[in-house]
Image (spheres, rainbow, N blue to C red):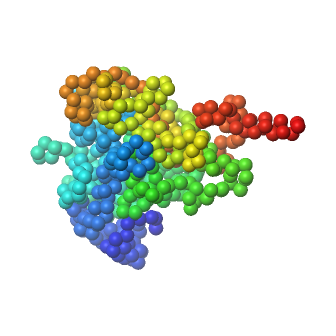
Amino acid sequence: MRLMYVATPVLAALLATAVASGASQENRHKRWVKEYTGTETCLKCHEEEAEAFFHSQHYQWRGETPAMVNSDGQKLGKLTMINDFCTNPGGAQWIGKVTNDDGKVLAKGCSTCHAGLGLLPAETPSRVQLENIDCLICHANGYRRDLYATEDGEWEWRPILWKNQEGMNSVARRITVPTRTMCLRCHSASGGGPNYKRGDIEYTLKEPDRSFDVHMAANGKDMWCVDCHAGDAHRVKGRGVDLAATDSPGHDLSCSGSCHGETPHDVPALDNHTERVYCTTCHIPVFAKDEPTDMRRDWSTITWSEEKGKYTYDVTLEQNVEPVYAWYNGSSYNQIPGQPVRRNTDGAVTMVTPDGDRADPAARIYAFKLHRGVLPVLKGKDWIMPVATEELYHHGDPDRAVRDAAKSFYGLDQVDYEWTDTVRYMGLFHEIPPAEDALQCLDCHSPDGRMDWQALGYDGDPLATRRTAASKDSGR
């Protein structure tokens, strides 16, 4: 049996009975779910779990920010920040159907990947908010949902079987710990397309071969996402560099924990690297191995797509991408809306940059996806601005989309802005191939190696420097 998030007395009794009766993981709720009538059915036994989940990042889309160097203690996250993919999920972009002139549905809102039934998450719990939690999206095999209009003209997510009580009951009894498939529903699809956003979380991870990922492959370790990421009280362990909030502060996630240790190679030359080089730097030679990933998105350049039947942004998709490398000490700078932007030496706005450098003893060299974008910046105040992307798919007017977003996000009726290049560092931690496919010495330590040593703070390749010094010493 795999890791569980919490163990309340009710849940412990339920599991103990299920195990004692020989019930499989997929039908352990069969004797308890007589008729599923919505989240209220789950709350009869699991209100404590629901309250815990309410406070998690998966529901709040914001949280504590101890690893963000410029947060000043603010609670931040998806709902409050602006990104260079779909920019911001608030306002009209949260929920609703956008259609083209032929009636084809172009978008349903960012709540598509929220573990709720359509309401924006409130900051304080209530019965309405607890009943808005969609437990089945993470815990029921075979569960599917779609967007439906309510009697009062609003929108809500409902199971596609909501009119089929027998089918709905069957699905609600198939409760499990979140499987890889359940996690991939959102984490692979985010950003507008398969693997568009993360780059290292592809649908292939549902049933990968060992050559693709040694951890998740059935002929490897056959691990699930929760084997590493499950924490207490529905809080998730781990934080990517580009996330503002930390769901489980004080519970860092690292390869060199209980799994591999600090010196796992039994080869001194390799183990000496681990103090300054993170594991995935060598063990993720490329990302986007099956599905291309979004490497640049330009919201200022909008064209009509006959294939998709909508207006769309200019995007550069790449496959088998080599990472870029930078120092990272576990903290990062994230551009906060409503504050003047920070630019790099090229003039691009640094949406996210890892904190740390060669002189920082807590920093190591990590592998990153470097995403580039083009977003509007408010003149005068120098604020980064979102774009009303969902409606843009229908009308195709980027200026209108910027002005609509400025009104809903900042409350501004009149704006003067300019389009600006942006950069975002995104950590790479998944899709580890077998050890024999890791980078070799000369992949980095050669004239044509992939490391930019000067950007990392060195005068040149440190191995070449040591060899030169050793040669001089031996000639004395």
The x and y percentages for residue 60 are 30, 51
Question: Could one spot residue 434 in this view of the protein?
Answer: no
Viewer-proximal residue, 461 or 399? 461
What residue is shown at x 71% (from left), y 30% (from top)?
Answer: 447
Viewer-proximal residue, 332 or 374? 332
What residue is shown at x 24% (from left), y 68% (from top)?
Answer: 44
The x and y percentages for residue 361 are 59, 48
In this rendering, is residue 170 above or below 389?
Answer: below
- Determine the residue located farthest toward the left in the rendered image: 152
What residue is shown at x 25% (from left), y 30% (from top)?
Answer: 406
Quarter of the image for residue 93 reads top left
What residue is shown at x 86% (from left), y 39% (from top)?
Answer: 474
Question: Could one spot residue 331 in this view of the protein?
Answer: yes
The x and y percentages for residue 419 are 36, 23
**Image label count:** 0
The x and y percentages for residue 346 are 49, 24
Viewer-proximal residue, 371 or 385? 385
Viewer-proximal residue, 103 or 299? 299
In-image side of 42 versus 5 (left or right): left
- Determine the residue located farthest toward the right in the rendered image: 476
Quarter of the image for residue 307 reads top left
In this rendering, is residue 220 above or below 106?
Answer: below
In this rendering, is residue 427 above or below 251?
Answer: above
In-image side of 344 versus 304 (left or right): right
For the C terminus, the quadrant is top right
